[in-house]
Amino acid sequence: MVNILLILTTLFMCNSLVFAGNNNTSASFLKIGAGARAAGMGDAFCGLADDAYAPYWNPAGLAQIKGSQFGATHLEWITKINQEQIGFVQQIGTKTAFGISISHLMANDFERTNQDGIFGTFDAANTLFGLSLGRQIGNRFSLGMNVKCINMYMDDAKAIAFGGDMGMLWQVSRGLRLGLNVQNMGTDVKFIEKGYPLPLNIKAGVSYSLGDSISGSGLNLNIDANKTHGLETNVHAGGEYWLAHTIALRAGIKNEITSDTHGKSKGMATGVTAGIGLRLGGIQLDYAYVPYGSLDVTHRVSLSMKQIPAAPLEPKVIPLAKVASSTQTAISLATASTTGTVSDAGTAGTVGTVSVPAAKEKPAPVAEAIVQTKDGKIILPSFDIRFDTGRALINTELYKQLEGIAEFMNRYPQIRIRIEGHTDNRAIDTQAFHSNQELSEARAKTVYWYLIQQEILAERMKTKGYADTKPIASNDTPEGQAKNRRVEIIIIEQDSK
C-alpha cells in the first residue's frame, strides 16, 4: 500500500512540472540548506541524505535511517536574519520511515519608508512545516516525498502556499549512491493580488563512501547539481572525513549563479565552505562556516541525537551440518547459546563473539576428507560460518572447525582467497560497531586473523564486508536472518605449480 501511494504521488506531482512563465519566484528561504553538516560540505548532500535533515536534501534517504534521529540548527544569516531548523525522523517497519521538518526564518526592524523618508519599522517571517515519507523498494532503490505548508508574513501582509518534493535514491554499489530530488512543486505565493511560484529546483547528487572499521575512520565524497528555473545549473561539491567515529573534518565548494531582483542571471559566484563535527555516543554537534563573498559570512550550529534500538538476540540453535562425501562438502559452523571471546595482538582489541553447539566429534581433516580437485583446478569446500546478531568473534570450540580452513590453505599454497563478511538487514549501532558495514568487515577480519595466527601469509588473503547487500535467504524470518549472518570464502586465484 505504501509503495502504491508513493508511485501515485510521484505521477501526480511530476504532472505539475510546468515552469512558470517568468523568472520571478517567491519563498526564497526554501533554497537555504538544512543542517550544519551539509553546509560544511558545500551543500552537496542529495546522494548521502542520511541524517535528520534528509527530508530537505532527498526524502528518499529516510528509508536508510534506522531507529530515530532528531536535529536542531541555528543559522545566523546575512543582514542580521536568523533561522531555526528542526528535523525529526522515525523508522516504522524495516523499510519505511517518516519525518517532520520545521523551519522558521525571522527578520526584525526593517525600516518603513515613503516619499517623506523613514517612518518606523516592521518585521517579516517565513515558516515551513513539512511531513515526509521514505520507502525502500527492493534491495537498492528508495522513494521519498515531502508535503509542506509555507506561511509568510511581511508587516501586515500574509500569504500561504502548499508544496511538495519527490526524491529517489539508488544504491549502485556498497559505497556509491545516486540521488534525485525535485523540490518545491506547488501553489503560488500570493500576498495581495499577483502570485509568484515557489522556487522549483531539480537536484541531482552522487555520493561515494569509504570506511575502515579497524581505524574507525570514514570518508564521504559528494557532488550535487541544481537546476533552478530561469537560471543555469549550479554545482556543489564537498566531503567529510571521520576520525575514530568521533571527529569529522569537512570542506566544500559552491559554484552558484547570482541573480538580480528580477531573477536575471548576473554571473557565477564561487565560495569555499568548512565545517567540523563532534560525536559522543548518540549525540553529535556540528558547525559550518559559509562565506558569501562581499555580502557576509554565515555561521551554522547543529545539535543532533539518534537512537537505534538493539537488535534482539535469537537463542534458536541451527544444527551442525553433516560432512558429505560428494565432490564439494560443507563444514557448518552454526549458532547456539554457548559463547566465548578471543582477542589478538594484531587487532585493536576483541572484535565480537560467535556461539556454537558443542561438537561430539572433531571433523575429519580437510586434506584427507573433503578437498577435491577437478580438471586440474582445486574446488573450495563450502564453509558455512555463521554469527550471533551484532557480533563478530569466534569462541574456542569454533577454532576446531576453522582448523579445516587453515589445513586447506596449507595444503594448497598456490591458492589466493577473499574472505567476505555479511550481516542480516537489522541496523547495528553499538559501541563496537557503528554500522552493518563495520560489523561485516569485522567478521571477515575474524577469520583473517585466525589464519594469520596459523602462519598463512597475509598476501594470500583479502577481506571485504558487504553488510546486508548480498542476502542468501529472506530476512523476514529468524531462520533467514541467521543464514545471512555469515562469512564466505572465495578462491580468487590459483597459481599453477
Image: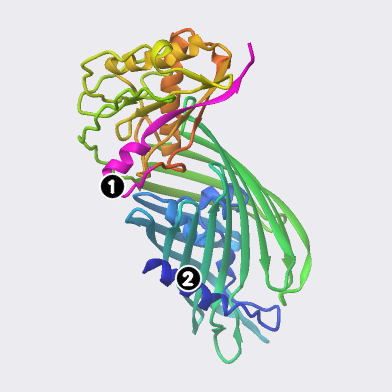
Name which residue lies at 36% across and 27% down.
392
Which one is nearer the viewer's eye here, 324 or 203? 324
Q: In which quarter of the image is the N terminus?
A: bottom left
Question: Residue 226's x, y, as percent?
Answer: 66, 62
Please give the label number shown on residue 7.
2
The three-letter amino acid code for the residue at tag 1 is: Thr
Q: Which residue is drawn at 72% across and 77% down?
A: 262
Q: Which residue is drawn at 41% across and 72% down?
A: 5
SS of the residue under disc 2: helix
Q: In this view, does 464 lie above or below 143?
A: above
Report the side of 42 relative to 262 (left or right): left
Q: Farthest bottom residue? A: 193
- Residue 477, labelled with which disc? 1
Camera-near label (1 vs 2) is 1
Residue 409: x and y in percent read 49, 13
Find the magenta span and give its range.
473-497
Dot 1, crowdedness within 10 Å: few (<14), some or many (≥20)?
Answer: few
Residue type at numbered disc 2:
Ile
